[in-house]
Image (spheres, helix red, strand yellow):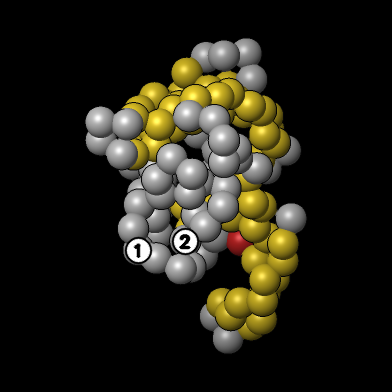
């Protein structure tokens, strides 16, 4: 987990972000990750026809919270999900080298899937 300095309301705060480990060699896979003390199941699948990654977020027991979230850079991926089981923080794909969407080999390499803890959100 990285801690980045930020400013909020004139006070300096530490922003807690987690880089979520992703594969640069697989086009579809599932893994578990703990976010804000809750375990979630993530399934990532690359759609070759569209050249996009899609994310399914589930509870630890496999109950789907949201399926088919298109992974785009610099956009809050959880923002439009209105489900109480959704992770409370912010999920972003960040690529400091480009505004292009992550291709098959980019996610986990140049584009990183990151999570900002709820306590660090404005």
**Is residue 62 among what the camera can see?**
yes
Q: Residue at x 57, y 48 (%)?
A: 108
Give residue 89's position: percent from left, percent from top: 55, 48
Pointer 1 local density, CA inside 10 Å: few below 14, some 14–19, many at least 20: few
Viewer-nearest residue: 118 or 97? 97
Residue to which mark 1 is pinned: 99
Tell me what residue is drawn at x 41 percent, y 49 percent. Answer: 102
Q: Is residue 116 above or below residue 79?
A: below
> Which residue sits at x=63%, y=45%?
20
Question: Image quadrant for the N terminus?
Answer: bottom right
Label total for image: 2
Marks 2 and 1 sit apart, C-alpha to C-alpha, by 7 Å
- Expressed as whole percent of the image width and height from the top left, the position of residue 53 reads 39, 37
Q: Is residue 102 left or right of residue 34?
A: left
Q: Quadrant of residue 17?
A: bottom right
Q: Nearer the viewer, residue 106 or 10?
A: 106
- Answer yes or no: do the residues labelled 2 and 1 have beta carbons within 8 Å? yes
Report the residue at 43% width, 40% height from top.
104
Residue 119 picture quarter:
bottom right
Residue 90 seen by the camera: no
Query: Horizontally, is 48 left or right of 42 in the view?
Result: left
Q: Secondary structure at mark 1?
A: loop
Q: Which numbered dot is residue 14?
A: none
- Which element type, helix, strand or loop, lies under badge 2? loop
Residue 20 lies left or right of residue 46; in this view the side is right
The residue nearer to you, when weighing 74 against 109, is: 109
Q: Which residue is mark 2?
A: 95
Q: Position of residue 78 (x, y in %)?
A: 43, 43
Please provide percent x and percent y for residue 64: 47, 18
């Amino acid at each position: 987990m990285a801690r980045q300095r930020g400013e909020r309301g004139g006070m300096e705060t530490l922003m807690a972000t987690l880089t979520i480990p992703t594969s640069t060699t697989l086009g579809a896979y599932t893994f578990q990750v703990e976010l804000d003390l809750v375990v979630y199941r993530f399934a990532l699948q690359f759609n070759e026809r569209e050249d996009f990654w899609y994310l399914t977020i589930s509870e630890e027991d496999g109950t789907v919270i949201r399926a088919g979230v298109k992974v785009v850079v610099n956009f809050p991926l959880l923002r439009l999900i209105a489900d109480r089981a959704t992770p409370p923080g912010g999920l972003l794909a960040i690529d400091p080298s480009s505004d292009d969407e992550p291709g098959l080999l980019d996610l986990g390499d140049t584009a990183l899937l990151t999570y900002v803890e709820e306590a660090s959100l404005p």
